[in-house]
Amino acid sequence: MLDAIMEKLLKIIKSTGSLVLCTLVTSIITVYLSSSVYVSIILNGRMYDKAYRKKNLDIITLSRTITEGSAYFGGMCPWSGGGLLVISSLGVGPWSYLPYVFGCWGAISFTILWGYTGKYMQKAEYDEDGKLISAELADAAE
C-alpha cells in the first residue's frame, strides 16, 4: 500500500524542494489521520526512504523533515495525546493557540526554504544495495 502511494507522489515530486514539501505535508496529514506522532514517523520514514536515497540525500535529512512535520503538529492535533495534553494544560480550545506556536511555523518555513535552495541539506552517496558510501554536509555558501 505504501508503494502505491509513493508511486503517485513520485509523479509530482521533481526536485529536492518538492520532495521535502511533500514529506512535510504527508507527515502532517498522517498525524491527523492516525492521531499518533509515532505512527506518522514510522510510516513516512518507510515511505520516503528510497526517494531520499535516489535523490542522494542522507536519511538524516529525511529524519529531520519528518520530525518537523510530525512532532510539531502532534501537539496541534486536538484528538492526539499531545493535543489533549496542550488543551487540558493551557485550558484553551482546540486550535486557539496555533498562532502562538512560533517555533513550529519557523522550523517548517526554514525546512521548505532549505529544501528548495539546497542549503543545509545533508548529501550522501549510496551503492546499488542502498548502503551508505559517503556523506557530507552541503556548503551553506553555495
Image (cartoon, rainbow, N blue to C red):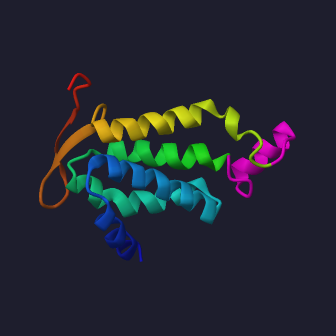
Does 2 appear above or below 78?
below
Q: Is residue 122 left or right of residue 105?
A: left
* Quadrant into which the N terminus falls: bottom left
Question: Which residue is the extreme one toward the top?
Answer: 141
Residue at image point 30% right, 65% down? 10
Location of the C terminus by quadrant is top left
Q: Residue 60, how many percent across, how many down?
A: 34, 42
From the viewer's perspective, is 45 left or right of 57?
A: right
Q: Position of residue 98 (x, y in %)?
A: 69, 40
Relative to 65, is 104 above or below? above
- Residue 1 lies in the magenta-colored region: no
Judging depth in this view, the residue of 51 and 100 nearest the camera is: 100
Residue sitting at x 34%, y 42%? 61
Q: Residue at x 68, y 47 (%)?
A: 76
* Residue 86 rendering spot, x and y as whole percentages: 76, 42
Residue at 42% from the left image edge and 38% from the top image edge? 111
**Could you tell whether 40 is left or right of 141 in the image?**
right
Q: Which residues are magenta?
A: 76-93
Left or right of 73 on screen, residue 87: right
Numbered disc total:
0
Which picture quadrant has residue 134? top left
